[in-house]
Image: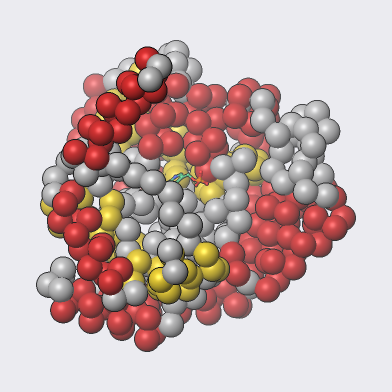
Amino acid sequence: MTHWNSWAERELAGLRAINRYRETVPFDGHGPEGRVRDQRLVSFASNDYLGLSSHPQVRLAAIAAIERFGAGAMASRLIVGTRSLHDELESLLAEWNQTERALVFSSGYSANLGVLTTFGETDVTLFSDELNHASIIDGCRLAKARTLIYRHLDLQHLQTLLRQTPGRKIVVTESVFSMDGDTAPLPALAELCSEHGALLILDEAHAALGPKLAATRDLEVLHVGTLSKTLGSLGGFVAGSSRLIELLVNRARTFIFTTGLSPADTAAAAAAVRICRSEEGNHLRARLRSLVDMLRPGHPSAIVPIVLGDDAAALGAAARLREVGIHVPAIRPPTVPKGTARLRVALSASHSEAMVESLRAALGRFNFV
Ligand code: PMP
């Protein structure tokens, strides 16, 4: 075997030995029901929080966009890869976020990389919550700025670090944390940022049920979001003041040097934003809220973690649930800290009450809660 192939084989064997080996498994279906290797499963694994990826209006919008504009954007946005669909989606996203302007990226991952590398210049210090998503971690690593990590949701610690640090500052956090489903205290965070003149970068990828940041005087903020979770499509965005977004257009390498979002993804996301802002959106959120309450009353988000500790325990629990037709992923390090492997239940408005009830019963029966 060649050098690189035998090296890769040894690496893979190492991952298998410590239960960290991963592979992609097709889940054929849409919405929560699908087939995996000929077994019918109800999934609690997707981020399709409002079920919009299967919504008839969203699907039709994607089809109509393909009919009108073709499958691909054909070029990067600044060359000839912008359609009126992109402008329309960006206006909708700006209005929805109550900002002057928004800019679409090809994923939430590249939105975070773009925003952190553009604003995280050499003379800047980035303050990042220790449990921030990999795309924020990578954005901080790629930025020229120095990064300081503060303890998870510990605003006292953040305040101490802000006080000790001169110069330009950026605080970056998720509003709902992707693996714990807990939420950042936005009013206090906003206050702290304005007090220290720090730009707040708020990743709202999982904020299907809020919290929403209230407009605060003196606070400069950029909202990062994704089109691939609540909006059921693919892509990411940054929303903020016209000036800041204009700078992203001119500087963010993950925006400039990549092909524009496809017409289908763009139109699907626009249809989904319209639904989110309508009465139907309110109904879907209320439905999601009530399903969360069935599983964990009062929990602030659609992500319900069941922390089991070691990797084998989480893998074993996921396997037992699969035997009874329920797919809940086992999340292991490095996605979560060592010793906190878990089942990550993600609820969606497209689940039925009966589905959530059968999950609840199975979790109880197997003593996972
Ligand atoms: N931010 C957070 C908090 C996320 O959880 C994710 C995706 N899991 C992203 C950004 C990246 O979004 P996307 O999947 O659109 O690349």
Whole-percent x, y for residue 319 in the image: 25, 63
Q: Which residue: 48% across, 17% down?
A: 121
38 relative to 126, above or below: below
Q: What is the quadrant of residue 300 in the picture?
A: bottom left
Quarter of the C terminus within the rendering: bottom left
> What residue do we see at 42% from left, 74% from top?
40
Percent x, y of residue 2: 40, 17
> Which quarter of the figure has residue 43?
bottom left
Query: Relative to residue 199, is residue 152 depicted above or below?
Result: below
Q: Measuring 31% from the left and 83% from the top, which residue is drawn there?
A: 357
Foreground pick, 138 / 36? 36
Q: Position of residue 261 (x, y in %)?
A: 69, 43
Is 307 situated left or right of 40 in this image? left
Observer-nearest of 83 and 92? 83
Residue name at image x 23 percent, y 32 percent: 14
- Tell how many labels: 0
Residue 86 visible (yes or no) = no
Residue lying furthest front = 1
For this rendering, which residue is in front, 272 or 204?
A: 272
- Locate residue 351 relative to residue 231 in the image: left or right: left
Question: Left of 172 or right of it: where is 20?
Answer: left
Q: How is the image coloured?
A: secondary structure
Q: Quadrant of the N terminus?
A: top left
Q: Nearer the viewer, residue 164 or 206?
A: 206
Residue 292, placed above or below residue 308 = below
Farthest residue, direction right: 68
The image shows residue 201 at horizontal and vertical percentages of 45, 38
- The reply to whether residue 236 is in sight is yes
